[in-house]
Image (tube, rainbow, N blue to C red):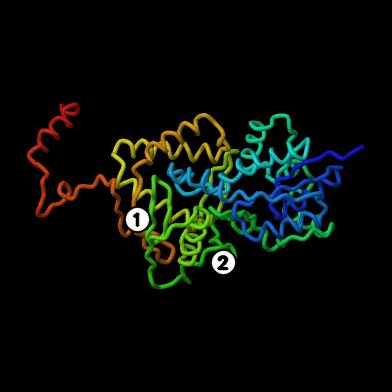
Amino acid sequence: MSKKKIVLAYSGGLDTSVIIKWLMERDYEVICYMGDVGQGADTKIGKERALQIGAKKCIVGDLKKEFITGYAFKALKAGALYQGKYNLATALSRPLIAEAMVRVAEKEKASAVAHGCTGKGNDQVRFEVTFHQKAPKLEVIAPVREWELTTRESEVDYAKKHKIPIEQTKKRLYSIDVNLWGISVESGKLEDPWTEPPKDTYISITDPEKAPGKAKYITVTFKKGVPVAINGRKYDPVKLVAKLNEIGGAHGVGRVDMIEDRLVGIKSREVYEAPASEILYTAHTALEELVLDRETRRHKVLLAERYAELVYYGLWFTPLKSSIDAFVDSTQKDVSGDVKLKLYKGSVTVAGRKSPKSRYNKKLATYGKGDIFDQSLAKGFIDLWAMPYRK
């Protein structure tokens, strides 16, 4: 009797490395899938590790361009930040990877898919909702929700027993997820919300205390809401994000430490690193303030919160999300221009902005020479504005 084939969402980390062996013990032929969304050398190391543990195959899919253009930049144009802080880097990658896994499962004639998400987390929802939408007949297995390894310490012991190569130790039990749009760090000492994030939680960003003492100025150019150039030099989307990660990271930009409201109802402490994202969100917001009319911008801000929730909740492939995308795209036709930014010891501030579509009129705004604003109109305006509230 042939073994059942299963496609595992594989990261190369502790959980999914242990899962390979755990599934093999239950008579599965494991095909690992690694979606390359910009985690760098991890894919090469991870592939070697998966095969060493006993996976039949380890397929690496290059998803970087699609991830940035089709997911990250859509969220950027929408202004979507979960709880006003989190750029959704991990959340954005999950539906993309899950959809790619479905294609692999179909090609390999697998009967099941698996992931390494916990029953407490959000990623389980993001993966499984996509599986249900794209291939409802596939069996979904979530080992971490059902196995006997109830703590990370027990997973480390299991890995040592079966000679599974891992980086984690019982002293450094962080769970780290890396992609081009951001890095998430959780668990270990971070589980105490009173504890300042230890120095070893800095993955790609320089501690602001050690960042250069001289500010760095850069200019980002946008075309219809999408960043296309840095300091006048054009980059393809993947290289542009990588370049801004390098520049921002060196200046301590992009760290977020937050208490996050998870979808399952609990709170968790998360640390995120996203230098390029923080730079681009700051710049994009500044440009929209310059070119969008007041009512459109106000409505878009309201939808940004809902959009962030949809992404966070794993509802990427839904009619509402597609409808908001259509609205957002219609608002971005004039969001073109340049934004000058100052990076200094962990902060990003706008130093200037300009656009051929600017709605700013200096002759109306100025208090100096050249003022054309007819101040005599103000009294009538105020009288009408206040009329419903007068006693």
- At horizontal 62% and vertical 53% (from top left) the residue drawn is 177
The N terminus lies in quadrant: top right
For label 1, the residue is: 339
> Residue 25: in sight, yes or no?
yes
* Mark 1 and mark 2 residues within 8 Å of each other at the beta carbon: no
- The picture places residue 79, in percent across and down from the top left corner, at 43, 44
- The picture places residue 101, in percent across and down from the top left corner, at 69, 41
The local secondary structure at tag 2 comes to helix
Say which of marks 1 and 2 sits in front. Answer: 1
> Residue 122: in sight, yes or no?
no
Is residue 219 shown left or right of residue 260?
Answer: left
User: Which residue in the rendered view is the most extreme toward the left?
Assistant: 376
> Please, what is the three-letter code of the amino acid marked with disc 1?
Val
- The picture places residue 261, in percent across and down from the top left corner, at 54, 43
Is residue 111 shown left or right of residue 2?
Answer: left
Disc 1 from disc 2: Cα separation:
32 Å
For label 2, the residue is: 199
Which callout, 1 or 2, points at the residue further toward the start of the chain?
Answer: 2
